[in-house]
Image (cartoon, rainbow, N blue to C red):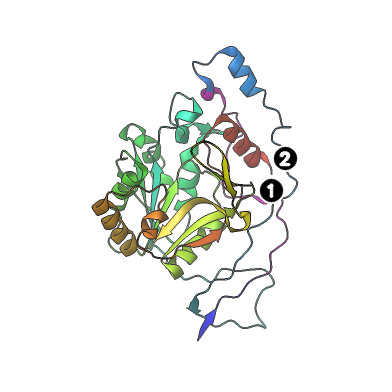
Amino acid sequence: MDIALSTYSAPPALHLSEFHGIHMPKSSSLSLLYNNKSKSKSKSKSNLSSTMFPLPQTFPVSRSRKLDVCCSATISSSSAPEQTKTIRNVKEKSVSVVLLAGGQGKRMGASMPKQYLPLLGQPIALYSFYTFSRMMEVKEIIVVCDPSYKDIFEDAREKIDVDLKFALPGKERQDSVYNGFQAIDAKSELVCIHDSARPLVSTEDIEKVLNDGWLNGAAVLGVPSKATIKEANSDSFVVRTLDRKTLWEMQTPQIIKPELLRKGFELVNREGLEVTDDVSIVEHLKHPVYITEGSYTNIKVTTPDDMLLAERILNVE
C-alpha cells in the first residue's frame, strides 16, 4: 500500500553528552596550527577562551519534515513507537561514498591541509571515514586525495569492512567529484559525496539524507539559516533583505543517484558550467533536490576557531 510519510513530532532536546560515534584520546591538537607564526599571533589564537564558545547545555535534535513522496510500507498505529524512526529504503552495500580530501586549507594557516590536522589525536579526515565505514548501507569509500596522504587511509584499511579506493583531486571541486565518481562500483545505487573537513556528521543524519536521496533522486543535508542575509550591489549598498525563513545553509553529505549525476556532469562539461556544490550539478538538469534537515554540530573545520569548537563538542561526554 502506498502511503505518504507524515510529519513527525520533534523529539526532546538532546544533551551534547549523548553525541556518539567517535572515541578518541583527548590530547590537544592545536600545536600544529601555528607553525611559522609569530608568538603574539599564536598567543592571541591559543588564548581563545571558553567565553568565545559558550558550552551549550542542550542541543536540539534535527526536526523531521514532511516528504511529498510516497513509499511502499505498512505502518500499524498500535505498534508505532513514540519517537521518530526512519523508514529504510536504502539497501545494504548499495552506497558509494566519495570522500573529498584533496583541499589545501589555506585559511587554516597550518603546515598541512586542514583535513589531516589531528583533532584530539586523530586526523580530521578519519572521523567521517570511520563513520561511513560502520554503516551497513555503504559498500565502498573512494577517497579523493593527494597521493602523499594516501597512507593515512591505507593504515586504517584493516579497521574497516568496506572497499577502499582512491582517486586524484582535480583543479576545482567539481573536478574532484568527477574523478571520484569515475571510480564507483557499477552496481551502486547512490553516490554519497562528503567533505572530509566535516568530521562531526552523525550516523543518524547520514541515514536520513540517504533515505531522502533514494526517494527523491537527490538530497542534501542543510540547516535553517540563523543569520540575516542581505543582497548587495557592486558598490556594497544593500539591495534587499532576503527572507530568512526560506534560506538554508548547505552541508554534506550530498546524495545523488548515479544516473542523475552522470547526466548532470555531461551537461556541466558540455556547457562549461561551474558549480559550487554537488547537487548544483543536478539542479542544472531542472531535477528537484530535497533538503534534509541536519545538525548545527556538523561544522566544516576551516579555521583555528572551528578547530577549537570541534574539540569542545567532542570533549563533552
Q: Nearer the viewer, mark 1 or mark 2?
A: 2
Residue 16's tag is: 1
Q: Quadrant of residue 311?
A: top right
Residue located at (41% from left, 41% from top): 156
Q: Position of residue 123 (x, y in %)?
A: 48, 35
Residue extending furthest right?
57
Residue 86, placed above or below residue 308 = below
Label 2, on which residue?
A: 55
Q: Amino acid at mark 1?
A: Leu
Sequence-first tag of 1 and 2: 1
Left or right of 308 in this view: 193: left
Q: Position of residue 127 (x, y in %)?
A: 50, 43
Quarter that holds the C terminus: top right
Q: Quadrant of residue 304?
A: top right
Q: Is residue 136 visible?
A: no
What stretch of residues is rendered in magenta? Answer: 9-33
Residues at discs 1 and 2 in contact (Cβ within 8 Å): yes
Residue located at (59% from left, 52% from top): 242
Q: Nearer the viewer, residue 158 or 307?
A: 307
Q: Position of residue 217 (x, y in %)?
A: 41, 66
| Cα gap from disc 1 to disc 2, whole angstroms | 9 Å
